[in-house]
Amino acid sequence: LGILYFMVILVVSHFLWKFLVLGDEGGEQVTFLRLDISKPFIFAAHHIAETTENILNYLGFNVRLFPNNVIRHIENNNSVQIVWSCTGIKQAYIYFCIIAFYRGSWKHKLWYIPMGFVFIYLFNIFRIAFIGGIVGKFPEQFTLWHEYILKYTFYLMIFLLWVIWEEKFVNKKK
């Protein structure tokens, strides 16, 4: 029953996001019920782009951050653009919904939800830096890593956070 409840919350929160939060992939405007909510997304996308540039340069890639959050590899001009949907905000929202609307004590939810946000943030930084590095050497693999492997790994991580919640905080009391 727990996994079914998890799936219902995941699907409902995903579709609520899809229908209520709108934005052009290449653009910077993001709206919620036609209200402009772009600023946090623009801030987060730029922060992630700067952080990714720093990580890639630290790891030995020669990259530079250009306007519109484009990270370009200097030696071959391969690039990626960090847009509003790369921020991990949607995944943090879905994770919040799963834990907030699932069974369990709010005493634990008040620290478990922010702790999960930290994991989501760190995984997202890893994800974007990894994709940025892949693009430098193997640009033809962008779609594979971005659309398939790391996208679903992101949701697997959210599932694992829920499993820990279920096992350590909900079922522990039974």
Image (cartoon, rainbow, N blue to C red):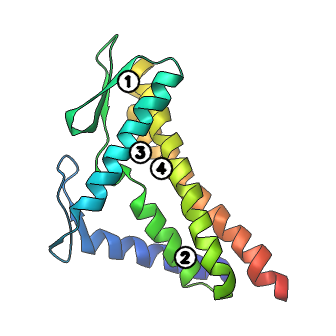
Q: Residue tagged by mark 1?
A: 139
Q: Are marks 4 and 3 in contact (CB under 8 Å)?
A: yes
Closer-to-camera residue (22/57)? 57
Q: Secondary structure at mark 4?
A: helix
Closer-to-camera residue (83/53)? 53
Position of 47 compared to 33: left or right? right
Numbered disc in front, either 1 or 2: 2
Q: CA distance from mark 4 to mark 1?
A: 17 Å
Q: Residue tagged by mark 2?
A: 98
Picture layout, residue 46 above or below residue 111? above
Number of residues whose C-alpha sits closer than 10 Å to that of mark 4, classed few (under 14), some (14–19) or many (20 or more): some
Q: Secondary structure at mark 3?
A: helix
Q: Secondary structure at mark 2?
A: helix
> Where's residue 68, x and y in %?
21, 39
Q: Residue tagged by mark 4?
A: 151
Picture layout, residue 163 above or below residue 169? above
Residue type marked 1: Pro
Numbered disc in front, either 4 or 2: 2
Number of residues whose C-alpha sits closer than 10 Å to that of mark 1, classed few (under 14), some (14–19) or many (20 or more): some
